[in-house]
Structures are given as structure tokens and as C-alpha cells.
Image (spheres, rainbow, N blue to C red):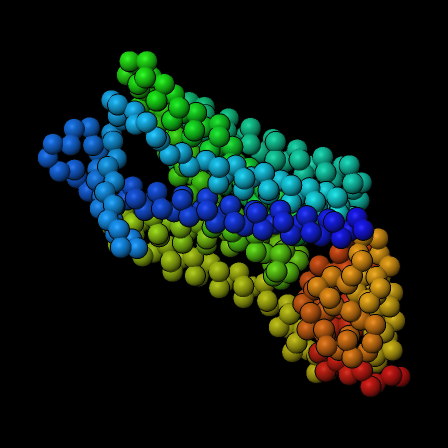
Amino acid sequence: MESVILDWLNLVVRWTHVITGIAWIGSSFFFMWLDAHLEAPGPGKEGVEGELWMVHSGGFYEVNKFQAVPTAIPRTLHWFKWEAGFTGISGLILLAIVYYLGAEAFLIDTDVADLTRLQAVAIGVGTLVVGWFAYDGLFASRFGQQNMLIANTISVIVLCLVAVGLSQLFTGRAAYVHVGALVGIVMVINVFVRIIPAQRNLIAARNAGDEPDPTLGKRAKQRSVHNNYLTLPVVFIMISSHYPMTFGHPQGWFLLIAISISGALVRHWFNLRNASTLAIWPIPAAVVIFIAVAAWASLPTLQAERSAASAEAVSFSKVRSIVDARCIVCHAARPTYEGFDVAPKNIRFDAPAEVRKHAAAIKKTTVDTNTMPLGNVTEMTNEERQLLGGWIRAGANIELAK
């Protein structure tokens, strides 16, 4: 009963996370596009920095951006914040449901680091808390304000080190998700601690009859630009759980860094294009990086495929014994592993034909990567993985019994 409730709760929270995330990312992309396409204002528009006309769904829209806070604050002022808030809240709940309540399966791998649930959760939460204060401290400091390029470089290097460190403590999937959670937390808190308060202070100064401090707007814009560049790396991390050849690779942290950089380059190209800058270099750079790391990561698998022809045939009886010892506790019509009422993704290995049917999935998650069994809770050995790989590469024959 408990696992059924958690499954449905997982679905509701994940769906909420995706919906609100789409809304947040959409507004971020739109306002970056809007800023880049502003034109010089027409005559008689005092205090207007730029203007823009748009057409959509049969309607025409005029937008004016003011150089500072307008002298008269409108009665209705629309704020874009709750998309970020609900994305952050749903993301943290999802992190707790999947990785903290299911720590033994999704967070901890004793072959990577022998951690207790409490230790692993403390490391995960501590990474998010310390990560935010380190980031905010850097960019709120005088050094960070006066040396933007250096501060940006430092923040990227530190994030890479976090990715490396977490990969030495958690499962590959959990390491990826915690890097994404850290970036997401930074983005959400930027909105509620740095961007929105700065905007409120500007409005309060105008209402009090004081001259608003323009540096508040500039600092809010800086954090908004950070959020914009971080969106595509976060989106990659959100979908990475479907691609075990990334997080399951022995150097998964390197793939995470490289693919995230390629995503940020794509975002940079969009921003340049929106600003009518014709530089095309970010796209080929992103493509080259992606293809290079994909080829490098796939090389061991390709080499194993080439050597498969000379390998000794593996009998299905050996495969059956491995599956029964390491996989059937979860992947069965009636799983016996605690927390699973039904087989994950409805993949079952009760009958030989079912094992053969899912041979490609077994190869991807158990042979090419070590992402299954989850957290290696059933302690599958490297020798067993090689035997499974040999059987699959030889054709996954279920008739060969000896």
C-alpha cells in the first residue's frame, strides 16, 4: 500500500515539476528575447529605454521598457515568480521521494562509497545548502561584482568539482540529479532572494519619492542571465535518467560536464542571435564537444562488440542463475524486494522468453553500464556482467542449456 501511494505521489509531483519548469523556462527565454529585440523608442516617450511591437494569435502587442522605475507605478504589475517557486518546491519534494526515501536503491551504491542513509542524505542536503551560500557569496562580494568573468569561471570550475566529488559518493544517477538540484536551487533562490527583492526595493524607493538605485536592477539582471544560461544543462540532467550510458559511465562526471557545456553554448548562440549578432561558432563548438564525448564514451562498448565473435558461447543456464540471483527480486510478476509491488517498467524475467525479450535493456543497464541492479543491492559481480554480455552478443540464445 505504501509503495502504491509513493508511486502516485511521485507521478503528481514529477508532473507538477515538469509543468511549472516549462512555464519558468519559457518566461526566461521570452524575456531574454524581448530584451535583445528592443528598438529605439519613438519621439515623446520619456524615460523609455526601448520599445517593441509583436503579433501573436491575431493580436498586436506594444511593449515599452523603461530605463529605470517609472515615475508612476501602475495599479497592476505582473510578477513572474511563482513558476520558479513551484518548480523549486516540487523538485525538492521529488528529490526526497525518489532519492532520500529510496536511498538504498537510488542514492547509495556500496561499491562506490559505503554510506549509511543518514550520511548520504546529509551529504546531499549539505551540498545544496553550502553550494547556494558559496555561489551567492561570490557574486554578492565586491570581487564578484568587479570581476564578472573571473567569478563566472570560478563558479563553473567549482560546479565541475562538485560533479566529480558527488560521483565518488553516490550512484551515477544520484550524482547527476544532485548537481541538477544544486543548479536548480541556485536559480530558484536567485529569483526570491536577489531578483524579486531588488525589484521591490526599486518600487519602494519610487513610492517613497527617492531616486531608485540603478545598481539593484543591474544585479538582478546579472542573476537572471545566470539562470538563463543554466536552463539547458538542467534540462539535460532532468532527462539523463533515461540514458544510462551517461550517468552509468565510469567517468560519468566528465560526460555531465561536457554535455552541460554544450547546452550552455547552444543557449549562448540563441542569446547572440536574439541580439542580432551573427556569430555561429557556439553551435559547431557544441556539436564537436557532444560528438567527441559520445564517441569516447562509446569506444569500450564498440571494442567489446568487435571481440564478441571470438568469445566462448555462454549457456542460458548460466544466465538464468545470474538473473535469478541478481534481478528477479525486482523484475518478477511478484517482486520480493521491499518497496516494489510491481516490476519496474513492467520488465519481468520469470520466463526465458521474457529474459530474451529484454536482452537489449539488460545489455544497456547491466553490461555496458553498471546502473542495474539499482545501487547494486544484489551485489552482481563484474564476471557475471561479462557473462551476460557474452550471451547477449552471441544472440541471446535461450535454447543453449548446457
Name the residue nearer the viewer: 372 or 329. 329
In the image, residue 135 above or below residue 257: above
Name which residue lies at 60% across and 43% down. Answer: 91
Q: Position of residue 228 (x, y in %)?
A: 42, 43
In the image, residue 78 above or below residue 71: below
In the image, residue 361 above or below residue 167: below
Name the residue nearer the viewer: 173 or 384. 173
Q: Position of residue 345 (x, y in %)?
A: 70, 64
Q: Position of residue 166 (x, y in %)?
A: 65, 44
Name the residue nearer the viewer: 312 or 145. 145
Q: Left or right of 46: which side holds 164?
A: right
Q: Left or right of 252: which side holds 70?
A: left
Q: Is residue 136 visible?
A: yes
Q: Position of residue 62 (x, y in %)?
A: 23, 42
Q: Which residue is most to the bottom? A: 399
Q: Quadrant of residue 330?
A: bottom right
Q: Left or right of 313: which side holds 43?
A: left
Looking at the rendering, in which quadrant would you find the C terminus? Answer: bottom right
Name which residue lies at 34% across and 30% down. Answer: 76
